[in-house]
Image (spheres, helix red, strand yellow):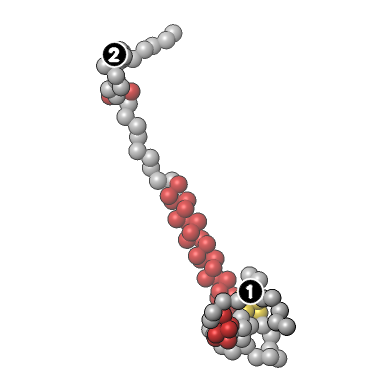
Amino acid sequence: MRPAVPSYAGWEDYNHQKSHFLEACFLCEKPLGQNNDIFMYRGNTPFCSQECRQEQIEIDEAKERSLKKLSSSSKRAPRQSKPAESTKKPSSPSKAVQRGTVAVA
């Protein structure tokens, strides 16, 4: 009897076309040998050498720095100043608004 595994049309074809993630270096796509060391980064990202792994780390750090720079510059964007109270018009004609300066001693 077949196991009750959910499937859909084309799944078998997709599964055969997709290579295993440990077959090639993520950066240079060099095939990873069976008896060679595999250098991992961020969980499941394989590399053929420490140099490839370090290059990817530097790429990711540069991306993170640029994203932080963009997000911090958008927070620092100058806000448009609100119009001063004296230039605002009353919202309804029935309200009286006094304009001027008040000094309290």
Residue found farthest to the front: 1
Could you say which is closer to the camera, residue 25 or residue 66?
Answer: 25
**Are the residues tagged 1 and 2 within 8 Å (C-beta)?**
no
Could you tell me the amino acid type at mark 2?
Answer: Ser
Image coords of residue 29 (percent x, y): 54, 85
**Above or below, 14 relative to 85:** below
Question: What is the x, y in percent for residue 40?
Answer: 65, 76
Q: Residues within 10 Å of mark 1 (few under 14, many from 20)?
A: few
The dot on residue 6 is 1
Cα separation between marks 1 and 2: 71 Å
Query: Circle 2 is placed at which residue position?
Result: 94
- Is residue 18 in sight in this rendering? no
Quadrant occupied by the N terminus:
bottom right
Q: Residue furthest right?
A: 1
Q: Is residue 72 above or below residue 63?
A: above
Above or below: residue 70 compared with residue 20: above
SS label for mark 2: loop
* Residue located 48% across and 59% down the image: 67
Q: Amino acid at mark 1?
A: Pro
Taking the image as shown, residue 56 lies to the left or right of residue 78, namely: right
